[in-house]
Image (cartoon, helix red, strand yellow):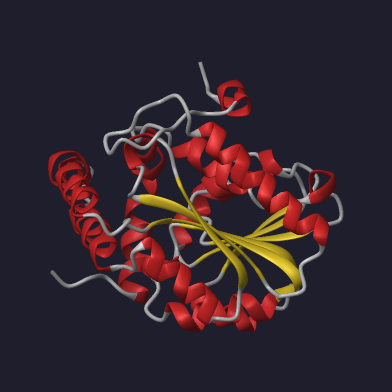
Amino acid sequence: MALLHDHDLAHAFDDAARTYDLLTALNPGYQTDLRRSARRLRLPDEGAGQHVLDLGCGTGASTRALLRAAPHARITAVDASSGMLRRARAKPWPARVRFVHQAAEHLQTMREGPFDAVFAAYLFRNVTFPDSVLASVRSRLRPGGRLVVHEYSLSGSVVHRALWTAVCQGVIIPVGTLSGDRALYRHLWQSVLDFDTAPAFADRLSRAGFTGVRTAPVAGWQTGIVHTFLARNDSAATTEQTEQMDQTDQTDQMDRTGQMGRTGQMGQMDQTDQTERPA
């Protein structure tokens, strides 16, 4: 099937915005995984004095995750879909959160920046030229700034590929059809199959000039389907930055201990996620 691109994709998200939050709420761990990825930015002082770009913010779920991870940061959240942004703006936000109608492909035209960190959730498989967007992201990051990408990026295993197709055909596409957005959710299914595997995207980040590239799988049923990618804008990382990223990996390894996933990998929410889970 042909994937949606550019304006067609933005319009599809415009139409789906009215039910998007409801459908993502049906995905176990969706919010928890976003919050964990946002915390991996490890912004100092709860983000005080930091300016963070939320690239592809949608209806604001990733923005909310950033705000939980760095409650004192200034956040600029951008998205190409005006419908998704309307949903995001309708929610309560502190004054330091600002939403901008902006396609990731035109990031270089933004007046704001440079940024201390960039968070991009479920974005890169939806852009036509990911290398160009990565180059723009790097140009907008301060030296030493961090990038965290939270993305559907398959491990490369045929098991994970088959699991993703089964979930899409059995749940995601039928539910999306009921909401009138079948084309968008068929795009979601196929775009994940066509996008980089996790090792390939990590290589893409390195080729784009990012350093310290690391990959971490999420826990639960999406292990091997969704990954978090961590990278820096320069090669001269401070000792403190390196130690913090090492600590992140150790914490994530502990988080994944105790809950057996379908593929034999382990997953467990840490104490913070248990506190954040709604009743």
Q: Against 211, is 47 above or below?
A: above
Residue 205, image x, y percentages = 52, 73
Residue at position x 33%, y 50% from top?
225
The quadrant in which residue 192 appears is bottom left
Q: Against 38, is 142 above or below?
A: below
Residue 174, image x, y percentages = 15, 42
Residue at far top of view: 279
Residue at position x 81%, y 49% from top?
44
Residue at position x 37%, y 34% from top?
220
Q: Is residue 93 visible?
A: no
Residue 37, image x, y percentages = 56, 47
Q: Is residue 150 visible?
A: yes
* Relative horizontal placement of residue 140, taking residue 201 as reference (left or right): right
Residue 194, image x, y percentages = 25, 68
Number of numbered discs: 0
* Relative horizontal placement of residue 276, taking residue 56 as reference (left or right): right
* Relative horizontal placement of residue 172, taking residue 94 as reference (left or right): left
The quadrant in which residue 219 appears is top left
* Relative horizontal placement of residue 252, taking residue 189 as reference (left or right): right
Quadrant in which the N terminus is drawn:
bottom left
